[in-house]
Image (tube, rainbow, N blue to C red):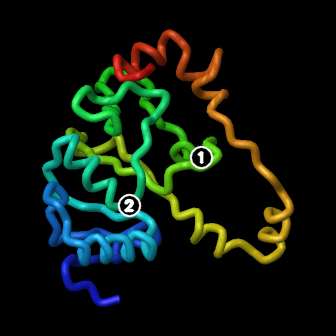
Amino acid sequence: MAYTTIDVDPSIGAVGALVSGVDLSAELAAETVAELRHAWLQHHILFFRDQDLAPAQQAQFAANFGELDVYPFMNALDAHANVIPIIKEPESTLNFGGAWHTDTSYLAQPPKATVLYGVEVPDEGGDTLFANATRAYVDLSDGLKQTLESLSGIYTARLVHGSGGGYNQVAAMSDLGESYC
């Protein structure tokens, strides 16, 4: 697809594309939203640099991709019920979502996407890592694909958020701060 309202650079590899030429704080034209959706479906993760978003603008941008949800395990910002702060102080030993996961995959109908907006990030370390599960599956041998297709999985938040779960320990509660329910 030839993009006319945005620039899409897929050179960062199989995990996504860098998008520029768009101000996410503004209301986006239908053509721009269509191009962003196409780029997202093609590259799975879109990265935007040098954006300045208030919580309402972050939610407005996310709403271009579908209905917004309310995350059940964190306290949202007072200014917007669909935006949650994820804060990790330098002295914290645990961070929210620090293990490999797919956001809210335990729901019967999980959201189709997550928007992560970095406000204050370290110059090095503290990286959020991403994986392209579609590409990983495509690259499997036919035999392993056949084996996996016969399996079923059970998704639950209980091991992390349930009674006795990792995030309900005293040390975790202090690291996760006031945002954690």
Question: In the image, is 148 to the left or to the right of 80?
Answer: right
| 136 in relation to 81, above or below | below
Which residue is situated farthest in the bottom direction here? 2
Q: Amino acid at mark 2?
A: Phe
* Residue 20 shown left or right of residue 10 in the figure: left
**Are dots 2 and 1 in contact, CB under 8 Å?**
no
* Residue marked by disc 2: 65
Closer mark to the observer between disc 2 and disc 1: 2
**Residue 70, how many percent across, how many down?**
43, 37
- Residue 90 lies in what quarter of the image? top left
Quadrant of the rendering where the N terminus is positioned: bottom left
On screen, residue 26 above or below 115: below
Q: Amino acid at mark 1?
A: Ser
- Between 21 and 16, which is closer to the camera in this rendering? 21
From the viewer's perspective, is 120 left or right of 90? left
Please, what secondary structure does the residue beneath circle 2 have? helix
Q: Nearest the camera: 167 or 112? A: 112
Tally of marks: 2
Q: What is the quadrant of residue 50 in the picture?
A: bottom left
- The residue depicted at 75 percent of the width and 75 percent of the height is 141
Q: Is residue 64 above or below residue 34?
A: above
Q: Give neighbour class at mark 2: few <14, some 14-19, many 20+ (Cα, 10 Å).
A: some
Residue in front for this viewpoint, 91 or 80 = 80
Which residue occupies 42% across, 52% down?
A: 67
Task: Tell me the tag on residue 36.
Answer: none
Which numbered circle lies on residue 105?
A: 1
Residue 85: percent from left, percent from top: 31, 32
Residue 20 locus on image (x, y percent): 19, 70
